[in-house]
């Protein structure tokens, strides 16, 4: 199968944990609902951060180690190559916190759930996130912001508002083709994007080895692994 992209098309891509699976990063639901052996409530909620900041930093430090070792796979590379063919009419929104899209060469992208390699003030004092590759073994190694607040991972915890939503909404409203890759359709608002695109009249395609929970919203479903299906899937007129 091929998906043809016409000169008038604008493409919106949404990726999830599945696109990084072939790079060796576990998906969220691959392990009985655990993320790398942890319950989400223990490592990825505002309450977990208040209760146990050391445990939260230990978890994200471990993900940083895994993320640095992983390499972009053919699916990330196919997305960067597609962007290069569609200047000004390609937008990528990822739910992933790894940096494999950037390392494959994608430019016009947002991390709606945050960035594993950034940190920001826990007090939301207005200072922007900073680059941070560190692995913190103990809490006293974690730096503080000039305002006195401790640095926290620049991650959208469950229950927090995703980043860049106005830009994402505007890009969806302008797109004529939405391609969703490797996401189970369980985490909102991302799982609802296909519905917005569908209602605006866009073609909507899902790519992954199993049908997502929101399968009925898609005009096409291509069953298979992202790294196998994506290279060669698109023809650009
Ligand atoms: P999910 O774990 O709920 O779903 C993963 C999906 O990927 C499943 O539908 C599965 O069928 C599919 N999949 C598995 N292997 C695939 C492959 N080779 N090619 C294509 N698809 C494949 O993930 P989600 O829907 O993205 O939600 C999980 C949340 O957890 C996200 O918000 C994300 O921020 C976070 N998370 C991020 C990472 C990462 O940054 N790499 C990893 C795990 C979880
Ligand atoms: Zn601060």
Image (tube, rainbow, N blue to C red):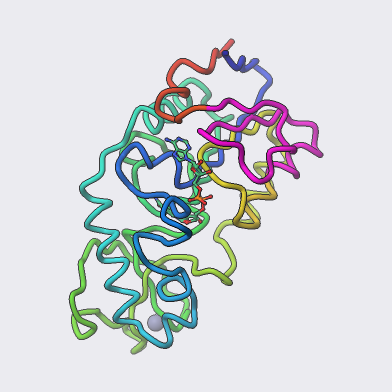
Quick check: which quadrant has ligand 2?
A: bottom left
Decide: is 222 above or below 61. above
Decide: is 143 above or below 17. below
Decide: is 167 above or below 127. above
Q: Give percent across and percent down for residue 6.
A: 65, 15
Look at 52% across and 39% down and name the residue there: 92
Quarter of the view holding residue 146: bottom left
Q: How many marks?
A: 0
Quarter of the view holding residue 204: top right
Decide: is 85 above or below 201. above
Rendered-image quadrant of the N terminus? top right
Q: Nearer the viewer, residue 35 or 173?
A: 35
Horizontally, is 166 left or right of 146 in the view? right
Q: Give percent across and percent down for residue 115.
A: 39, 58
Q: Give percent across and percent down for residue 21.
A: 38, 41
Q: Is residue 207 magenta?
A: yes
Horizontally, is 142 left or right of 217 in the view? left
Q: Give percent across and percent down for residue 180.
A: 58, 37
Q: Nearer the viewer, residue 133 or 209?
A: 209
Rendered-image quadrant of the C terminus? top right
Q: Nearer the viewer, residue 201 or 170?
A: 201
Residue placed farthest to the front in the image? 32
Look at 49% across and 27% down and name the residue there: 224
Q: Is residue 136 magenta?
A: no
Q: Which residues are magenta?
A: 194-223
Q: Nearer the viewer, residue 132 or 192?
A: 192
């Amino acid at each position: 199968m091929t998906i043809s992209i016409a000169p008038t098309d604008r493409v919106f891509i949404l990726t999830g944990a599945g696109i990084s699976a072939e790079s060796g990063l576990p998906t969220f639901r691959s392990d009985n609902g655990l993320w790398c052996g942890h319950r989400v409530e223990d490592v990825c909620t505002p309450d977990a951060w208040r209760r146990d900041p050391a445990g939260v930093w230990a978890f994200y430090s471990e993900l940083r180690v895994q993320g640095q070792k992983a390499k972009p796979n053919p699916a990330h590379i196919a997305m960067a190559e597609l962007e290069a063919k569609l200047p000004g009419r390609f937008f990528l929104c990822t739910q992933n916190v790894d940096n494999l899209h950037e390392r494959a060469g994608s430019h016009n992208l947002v991390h709606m759930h945050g960035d594993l390699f950034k940190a920001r003030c826990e007090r939301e004092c207005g200072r922007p996130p900073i680059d941070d590759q560190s692995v913190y073994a103990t809490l006293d190694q974690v730096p503080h912001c000039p305002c006195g607040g401790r640095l926290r991972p620049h991650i959208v915890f469950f229950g927090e508002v995703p980043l860049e939503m106005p830009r994402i909404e505007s890009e969806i409203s302008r797109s004529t083709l939405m391609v969703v890759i490797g996401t189970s359709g369980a985490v909102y608002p991302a799982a609802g994007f296909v519905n917005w695109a569908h209602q605006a009249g866009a073609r909507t395609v899902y790519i992954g080895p199993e049908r997502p929970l929101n399968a009925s919203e898609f005009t096409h479903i291509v069953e298979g692994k992202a790294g196998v299906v994506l290279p060669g899937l698109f023809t650009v007129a």
